[in-house]
Amino acid sequence: MATTKTDPKLNAVSAEEKKGKTYEGLTRQQLIDAYRIMYASRRVDDREILLKRQQKIFFQISGAGHEAIGVAAAFCLKPGYDWFYPYYRDRALVLALGATPYEMLLQAVGAADDPSSGGRQMPSHWAYKRLNIVTQSSPTGTQILQAVGCAEASIYLRNHPQVTEKVSGDYRQFKDVTFRGDEVTYVSLGDGTTSEGEFWEALNTASNKKLPIVFVVEDNEYAISVPVEVQTAGGNISRLVSGFPNFQFEEVDGTDPVVSYAAMKRAVAHCRAGKGPGFVHAHVIRPYSHSLSDDERLYRPDVERQRDAARDPINRMQMFLLREGLLDENGINKLEKQVEDEMQAAVDRALEAKFPTPETITNYIYSPDLDPTSAQLDAQPVFPQPVDAPAVDGKKPAPALPKTMAELINATLRDEMKRDERIVIFGEDVADASREDYLKKKLVKGKGGVFKLTAGLQMAFGSDRVFNTPIAEANIVGRATGMATRGLKPVVEIQFFDYIWPAMMQLRDELPVIRWRSNNAFSSPLVIRVAIGGYLTGGALYHSQCGESIFTHIPGLRVVFPSNALDAAGLLRTAIRCDDPVLFLEHKRLYRETYGRSHYPGPDYTIPFGKARIVQPGTDLTVITYGAVVPRALQAAQRLEREDGVKVELIDLRTLNPFDWETIAASVSKTNRALVAYEDSLSWGYGAEIAARIADKLFPQLDAPVRRVAAMDVYVAYQPILEDAILPQANDLFRGMKELAEY
Ligand SMILES: Cc1ncc(C[n+]2csc(CCOP(=O)(O)OP(=O)(O)O)c2C)c(N)n1
Ligand SMILES: [Mg+2]
């Protein structure tokens, strides 16, 4: 547990008289170890500050003042057994769990061998796979909901232990899934970070679900320059959270390792016993300003800083060891010298480390193991044999009708859930009924989603596999990310694309970045199904939005947008079996459209990503589109052929990241004319990138400018006359195609 080996000679002082005496259960040896780690932690900070001044590292943020609570927490938890989401001040905790100063310095210099990120993240952004310390980022508070998801995964895995078995053929082949049964998730944050909404969403879920997670708020009374009373109503977070049920609450002097240990022990015991979450509010200090870019003397007077200095945990611990006769001055000096020597060796080694090379930059944006564009995923549909049903009253029943996109998505989810018990489905209203008693007593039929896409799944697979969440989109995506880190496969739903924005921090800064920023140590493959789009007649501003280009702009996130039932089934199955996070956009208007219905293509029907479909071949003009514009463009193309004899090659991209450049290039090289059509507003939309690429790469082949047809640069209005005028219609597409063909 200690960073450095214990020197038995240090134990010589008063060993006899102190034999057997413990402090809140901490032995003399543990207290000496605690001091050694705390001191080492402070010295790593000091050395980093020096290195920064020498311009050998590029950033520094310290754990100074937070050492005692960190070591106390680590002493109550088990590395590689429990799970950790520590924030940047947790250097002492991370050292106490088993990381080394050398490893930390590797991150500071940006070394290729930095085990946390391979030189991709700033120092103090911890990730140590062997210790179950999950990759951490810079946004304040995004770790909290993920930690909640991690704690939920512990319970799920305990109830479904067989899912830890490796299965080949999909993402499960590449992920070790472990659980212990009584493991606890640790998550920490600063006082300022309690102002983030995600903090409250996390407490809500942890409390409601009695999760084994301990929240540690390290309250140094400042968030950069903003004091705690500005962040927190009344100035004390403990008072505000005290109404959450099922918690073990502790408020403690976090500069004192002994009382901190006692508080942490009670909180962790509560979690391990399955009684609910813990909340430890630790009052600490921040003696080194916020970071090396901050000078706290600009906003804190000397008198306040001196008051803090009197509580410095390093001095206090040293005094404690001396006062209690646990170590004498000689012992302290020896210990500090030992740490110092080791630190020097670590610095010397880290400064010799190799740097990552630019060829490695794009490694691990996506899974290196499973390629969702692989031709192996190009399956043939297996449609059911038509059954010759017997005549009833002399009348033969009509043959089974093709199914809607909504029905095939539901059927695909059902078959995948049957096949893979790691799949959990959650979101707003996705369950049949949260009060499952009503279902059991058959008092209600069940809802299963506002569009009924998940209907019947809770009844078929149980309430721990399909469940409702609070109306909190960050909660959905953040928890899903934590679960996926542990190896589950969340297939979550965002009810309307218009309401995806509260999850944006998780979607931009967390989920798609986890693999890259941890240099492939962690990953969170999952699926987010989102109902998107307009043409609804009355959908108005807040039930009609597109905006897919915002997400195709995010490296690490796959984006899928099917236009018909068969593609939806095949692409959703690929999304679920994939090893990357996937945003699966389902157009509401297409859910029950007559266009593009299909029989169910069987339980193994997959379509590779990045493979467009040629909806109709043509020789005169290429139209590139996707989603609900596909049937409209088809209608326009058919009219153009009828009236003017122009043969349009219509391409349905099906997936937007990756996208099928080969098919586009081959088609445009043949037709020499390209029109890109999309439902989102024209400027800066998805088609802008496609148009730019065509203009750039295929310029010699073009006989006309690249054109776009899209929505007006405005919101979708409620009145149908306005909606029709705002969104691209078959007539607009017809006009655009005709003009381009005649150019
Ligand atoms: C979402 C977000 N907003 C702003 C920042 C910039 N920032 C970094 S740390 C910090 C203050 C955090 O204060 P607190 O939670 O009290 O932690 P402390 O640094 O005091 O330990 C801020 C505003 C950020 N990293 N993330
Ligand atoms: Mg703070």
Image (cartoon, rainbow, N blue to C red):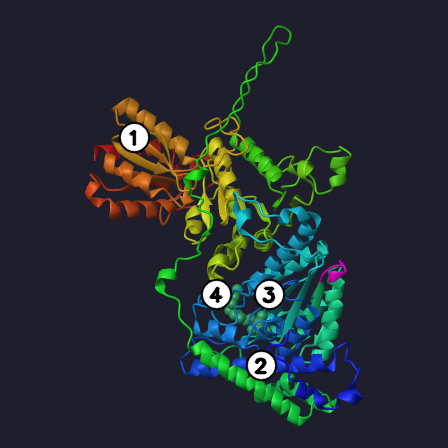
Disc 4 residue type (three-letter): Ser
Q: Closer to the N terminus: mark 1 or mark 2?
A: 2
Q: Position of residue 353 (x, y in %)?
A: 42, 74
Distance from disc 1 to disc 4, alpha carbons, whole Å, reads: 49 Å
Residue at the (53%, 51%) spot, across then down = 174
- Say which mark, if any, is on residue 117: 4
Query: At numbered mark 1, what does the secondary structure look like: helix, strand or loop?
Result: strand
| Magenta span of residues | 272-277
**Label 4 element class:** loop
Label 3 belongs to which residue? 131
Where is 704 relative to 17, above or below?
above
Task: List x then y, in percent, for residue 369.
Answer: 47, 50
Is 606 or 709 nearer to us in this picture?
A: 606
Callouts 1 and 4 close, C-beta under 8 Å = no
Q: Nearer the viewer, mark 1 or mark 4?
A: 4
Was residue 274 drawn as part of the magenta stretch in this picture? yes
Name the secondary structure under disc 2.
helix
